[in-house]
Structure formats: structure tokens, C-alpha cells
Image (spheres, rainbow, N blue to C red):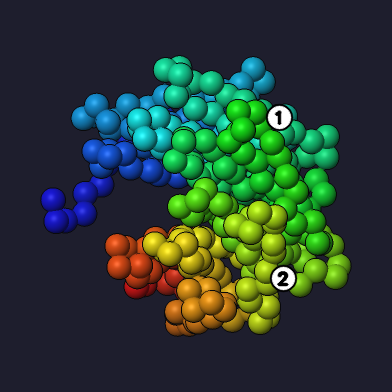
């Protein structure tokens, strides 16, 4: 309409944490989020013209729906990755069959398997998910591109895999940004890291090691039309919003905003000219900020 409009989508008690949004080809919104009252995964869409909310996964014992990430296939069906607190596992929920179906992709007796999830779909509508194995501190990746779920440890060099973000290039190769945390193991570097299987094997790269840019550092990745990576992230040493890209052939980093404590909860998107648009939190002024 040219002006900002606000709408309460779900007013039931304690709903709305861990939100993720995707738009279909008609520009209708599809949102995944957590229902803390019922420990369930919920989903909302205005595809019918009015907002409709649904419990997508409540599981037998409850505990599903944290760390949600949503993507839509070509038919507008929802595919959601999320963490199930009861099974301590990565779950995948979709309505592609016409009803909601949830699959446990991977679980662990050590707990926290599948936090910090991020999902992307390839051109065939198959899911590719990056996530953190909190039990042993690894970055992991799962896909059902072969018809069955296959999980892979991408990086096990220390305590790595916080705040994952995944994007797929035109060939369906995965590109993942994530953090290296010093909080559980000594000897790790608190760096911003990047992993891709574009060469046919997983290759991990340290993008930024200047101070504490890893650890509990938020990351978000997007790919341009040439398949180059653009990452927004938080510098926890200097409390800055930073940006990195390998569009020139080598990694180049820049400080985008250093006015106070800025850069938490960052998310990046690229326009048709491959220019970056970044949303983030200004902790100094308790404000939402935008940079481009």
C-alpha cells in the first residue's frame, strides 16, 4: 500500500518465537513459528486472503518447533526445519502431501541435535538443511535429494556450527555461513566460517578472524546471480555490523555500522542488481535498523 501495515496473526498465549517467513509466487506470506504454551510448531498463511494458523507439529510428547526455518516449493507447499526438544533432534515438517507430515532427520542421545537450523530447497523441491550438533559441537548438513535423508558432518574442527545460514546456487550446491564458538571448547577461534560443497567435496574457509566475530555471532547468507556469497554478521568484539563477500574472487570484509552496539539478529537479502539489504538490531537504542 506504500505504508507499513501491522497485523496480529496469532494472539493465542506465548506464540511467535523463532519465526521464519517465505513468500509464494502470488506474494502471499507463509510463516513458521514456535508455540511455547503447547511446545509445538505452528504455521500461518494468508494465502486464502485471510490469516489461517495451524499446528504443524505437536508430536506425541510435545517439544517441537524451536529454531524454525521455512522454504516454499514451486507449488507453494511449506517445508520447515526445526528442533524437537524431546527427541533432541532435527525435525522436518511439510504439507506437500496435503497433510502435515513430520520426519525426524537426526537425533542424538547427547542432546541439542538440530538447533540453529536453516533450510533451502533445490529446483526439484528437495530440502537442504544446515544445523548444529550441540552434543559434540559440529556443523552438519542434511538433504533428501536422493529420496532418503542423508546427513553429513561438514565441520568438526572445534565447537562449530552456531547460527547457520544456508543458500543454494543454480546447480544446487550448498553454501553455509556459521560461527566458531569458544564457549565450550578451548582452542577454537571465535571466527566467521563458510562451507560449500560446490567443488564436489566440502571445503571450509575462515572468512573473518579479526577478534570475536564468531561465538554467539549471528550470520546470514545470500548468493548473487553468479553464485558468489554475501554474508552479514555481528562482530562481538567491537559490537559492529559487518559484511563479507567473495564476489571479487577473494574474501573481503567491511564494517557496515559501528555506531554503538549494532548487528545482532542480522538477516541479508540481495536485490536484482545484486546489491545487499541488511536488517539488524541496534542494542544501544533498542531499535530495528536497515542498511544497504
Residue 149 appears left or right of 167: right
Per the image, label 2 sits on a secondary structure element best described as: loop
Image-quadrant location for residue 146: top right
Residue at which label 1 appears:
86
- Determine the CA span between mark 1 and mark 2: 29 Å
Q: Residue at x 65, y 28 (%)?
A: 148
Precedes in sequence: disc 1 or disc 2: 1
Query: Which residue is painted at 50% across and 61% down in the image?
Result: 221
Q: Position of residue 75 (x, y in %)?
A: 35, 30
Check disc 2: other Cα within 10 Å, few if <14, some if 14-19, many if 20+. Answer: many
Q: Is residue 187 left or right of residue 60?
A: right
Q: Which residue is mark 2?
A: 190
Q: Position of residue 72 (x, y in %)?
A: 41, 37
Q: Nearer the viewer, residue 133 or 246?
A: 246
Q: Quadrant of the C terminus?
A: bottom left
**Residue 86 image point, x, y percent:** 71, 29
**Which residue is located at x 63 percent, y 76 percent?**
208
Q: Residue 170's spot in the image, x, y percent?
A: 45, 52
Relative vertical location of residue 222 with respect to residue 73 in this rendering, above or below = below
Name the residue nearer the viewer: 282 or 250.
250
Q: Residue at coordinates 70% horizontally, 55% vertically from top-left?
A: 201
Amino acid at each position: 500500500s506504500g505504508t507499513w501495515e501491522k497485523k496480529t496473526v496469532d494472539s493465542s498465549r506465548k506464540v511467535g518465537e523463532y519465526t521464519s517467513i517465505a513468500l509464494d509466487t502470488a506474494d502471499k506470506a507463509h510463516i513458521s513459528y514456535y508455540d511455547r504454551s503447547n511446545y509445538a510448531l505452528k504455521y500461518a498463511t494468508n494465502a486464502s486472503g485471510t490469516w489461517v494458523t495451524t499446528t504443524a507439529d505437536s508430536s506425541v510428547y510435545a517439544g517441537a518447533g524451536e529454531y524454525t526455518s521455512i522454504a516454499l516449493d514451486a507449488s507453494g507447499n511449506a517445508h520447515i526445519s526445526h528442533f524437537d526438544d524431546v527427541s533432541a533432534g532435527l525435525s522436518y515438517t511439510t504439507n506437500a502431501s496435503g497433510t502435515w507430515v513430520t520426519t525426524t532427520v537426526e537425533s542424538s542421545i547427547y542432546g541439542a541435535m538440530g538447533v540453529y537450523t536453516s533450510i533451502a530447497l533445490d529446483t526439484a523441491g528437495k530440502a537442504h538443511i544446515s544445523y548444529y550438533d550441540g552434543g559434540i559441537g559440529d556443523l552438519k548438513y542434511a538433504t533428501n535429494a536422493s529420496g532418503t535423508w542423508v546427513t553429513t558432518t561438514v565441520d568438526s574442527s572445534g565447537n562449530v556450527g552456531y547460527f547457520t545460514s544456508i543458500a543454494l546456487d543454480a546447480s544446487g550446491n550448498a553454501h553455509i555461513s556459521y560461527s566458531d564458538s569458544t564457549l565450550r571448547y578451548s582452542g577454537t577461534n571465535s571466527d566467521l566460517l563458510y562451507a560449500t560443497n560446490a567443488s564436489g567435496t566440502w571445503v571450509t574457509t575462515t572468512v573473518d578472524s579479526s577478534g570475536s566475530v564468531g561465538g554467539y555471532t549471528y550470520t546470514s547468507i545470500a548468493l548473487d546471480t553468479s553464485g558468489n556469497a554475501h554474508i552479514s554478521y555481528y562482530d562481538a568484539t567491537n559490537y559492529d555490523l559487518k559484511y563479507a563477500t567473495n564476489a571479487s574472487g577473494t574474501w573481503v570484509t567491511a564494517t557496515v555500522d559501528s555506531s554503538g552496539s549494532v548487528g545482532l539478529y542480522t538477516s541479508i537479502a540481495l536485490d536484482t542488481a545484486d546489491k545487499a539489504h541488511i536488517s539488524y538490531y541496534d542494542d544501544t537504542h533498542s531499535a530495528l535498523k536497515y542498511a544497504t
